Image: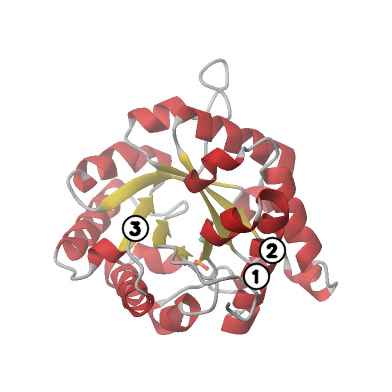
Amino acid sequence: MNPQGFVDTVRHNFIVGNWKMHTTAAEATQLAKAIANGMGVMSGKDRVSVAVCPPFPYLALVGEILKGSCVALGAQNLYPEKEGAFTGEVSPTMLRDLGCIYVILGHSERRHKLGESDAFINQKVRVALTAGLDVILCVGETSDQRKANQTEAVLDRQLVQGLVDVPAEVLTRVTIAYEPVWAIGASGHEATPQQVQDAHSLIRRRFARMYGEKSAQAVVIQYGGSVKPENAASMLTANGVDGALIGGASLHADQFLAIVRAGIVEAQTKGKSA
Ligand code: 13P
């Protein structure tokens, strides 16, 4: 048993780069090539799963570069309809067509800057899974919510409402990313490994109440919030952390690869493999 009361289970480490609204076509090309090449020569790479999520316009470009590599392609969002009169939107079918395996949903930037509700995010989660995309569902409290002792309530709400009507059978295709809003980006405050561990434990407990202990032990929970080469080892070794969702540092191949390496070291120590 670990200190949170869960029987230690060997889950895999999943490291994902969220490029957000960054890069030009030339930069995306260079970055994807550097990551694919770096991963190609990395020892122990079979111990972790790795993906990058470029902006929509570069998905095809990056997808071509990643073909044959061990880096998977993901998208940062979708619209929860197969097709239709939804000007400016992108469907899960299109993402699958472009070779996407994953989609990030419920990112705090979409929740807070674009006003996405839990119900809308849930719709996206269900449609993505039905279309064959694996989901990375982001949850996380704001600084004010943490100060008001609402962290648990917020995480509970985002999980429960985000996963309405998502059956246990598809949970192996759902990753949770804990991203405290106050820790994201250059102006964020770095969370301590203890804060990360505590939040991951809350999430796993909620999962156990929703889907049972076995599913809770199996669910991959990434940490996201200013993960950098300098803090990767301490974040990734925190109890209950199964990899990272990385923003800023994922735009630099050397930094992203250094975090992947930290994930491999942690996986080797714990006997994990992808
Ligand atoms: P940073 O790594 O830049 O803090 O971003 C985290 C994030 O939002 C990843 O989705």
Whole-number angstrom distance, CA of label 1 to CA of label 3: 22 Å
Left/right placement of residue 250 relative to residue 78 reads left
- At x 46%, y 51%, the residue is 21
- At x 45%, y 37%, the residue is 133
- At x 65%, y 75%, the residue is 5
Q: Mark 3 points at which residue?
A: 49
Whole-number angstrom distance, CA of label 2 to CA of label 3: 24 Å
**Identity of the amino acid at label 1?**
Ser
Q: Nearer the viewer, residue 174 or 195?
A: 174
**Identity of the amino acid at label 2?**
Arg
Image location (x, y in percent) of residue 55: 41, 45
Residue 205's disc number: 2
Question: Judging from the image, what secondary structure is the residue with disc 1 in?
Answer: helix
Farthest-out residue, right: 148
Quarter of the view holding residue 27: bottom left
Residue 179 visible somewhere in the drawing: yes
Image location (x, y in percent) of residue 182: 66, 71
Farthest-out residue, left: 41
Q: State which tag comes first along the sequence, 1 or 3.
A: 3
Quarter of the view holding residue 119: top right
Residue 192 visible somewhere in the drawing: no
Q: Quadrant of the C terminus?
A: bottom left
The vertical placement of 109 against 83, above or below, is: below
Q: Is mark 2 within 8 Å of ligand 1?
A: no
Q: Which of 148 and 173 is in front in this view?
A: 173
Q: Which-is-in-front pick, marks 1 and 3?
A: 1
Q: Do the residues bearing badges 1 and 2 touch, measured as CB atoms within 8 Å?
A: yes
Residue 201's disc number: 1
Question: Judging from the image, what secondary structure is the residue with disc 2 in?
Answer: helix
Residue 128's disc number: none
